[in-house]
Amino acid sequence: MSESMERAHETIHEAHHIASDPWARGTAVLVSFLAAALALAEIGGKSAQNAYLTDHIAVSDDWAFYQAKNLRSVILGNQAGLLESLPNASDAAIQTKVATARSEQARMRDEPGKDGMKQLAEQAERRKKERDHEFHRYHFYEYAAGALQISIVLASVSVVTRTRPLTIGAGVIGVAAGLLALGVALGMV
């Protein structure tokens, strides 16, 4: 028999031995479960990332609207001050314009049930908390995904090196990462 034929025969024999080894098959099943858990953690991470970006845009919009209202309020205040400094400020027409500007300025600052500056600031702060919560969820999913990737690598290496402690380590890390991802999904983390 030639040397290359002999090597091929040995490789086939070793592959058959690995395929019939229950430990190797169990490790292959472990890797498949870890891969499925990784896919779910990645889906959760992308969902949290999208929610974070959506909330971030909403917070930016709220503060931009707040700034626009603030600018209009400042202009109305300056308008009232300018009208009050006129020599004929005591005229009824001027006093009506001053009162209207001051009233409109007050409405810009606080308009219950609507979108006054006070309400916009409260809404932006609430959305900021939601955004930050989604940011933390995203990071926890990323930690879980990273740990699952490490556990898959360890389990794969354990088959090649035939080192069972690596398989056990991969399983422990995988279970911990899976529980972390589940805790994030259930809102426990």
Image (cartoon, rainbow, N blue to C red):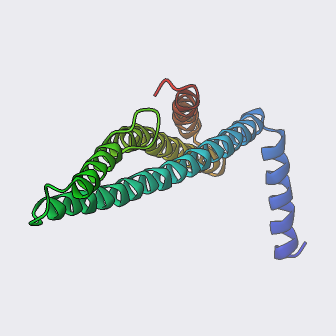
Q: Is residue 102 left or right of residue 134?
A: left
At x 61%, y 42%, the residue is 44
Residue in front for this viewpoint, 78 or 173: 78
Rendered location of residue 181, percent (x, y) = 56, 34
- In the drawing, does residue 62 fall left or right of residue 20? left
Q: Nearest the camera: 12 or 32?
A: 32
Question: Is residue 115 placed above or below 94 in the rendered structure?
Answer: above
The picture places residue 121, in percent across and down from the top left corner, at: 34, 43
Q: Nearer the viewer, residue 42 or 28?
A: 42
Task: Please state the horizontal and vertical placement of residue 173, each as a whole percent of the image.
Answer: 51, 35
Q: Is 91 placed left or right of 175 in the picture? A: left
The picture quadrant where one finds residue 115 is top left
Which residue is pictured at 23% across the width and 63% down the height? 79
Q: Quadrant of the N terminus?
A: bottom right
Q: Residue furthest front?
A: 91
**Rendering quarter of residue 158:** top right
Residue depicted at 20% across the width and 58% down the height: 80
How far across and down, in percent of the image, does residue 134 sit?
Answer: 48, 41
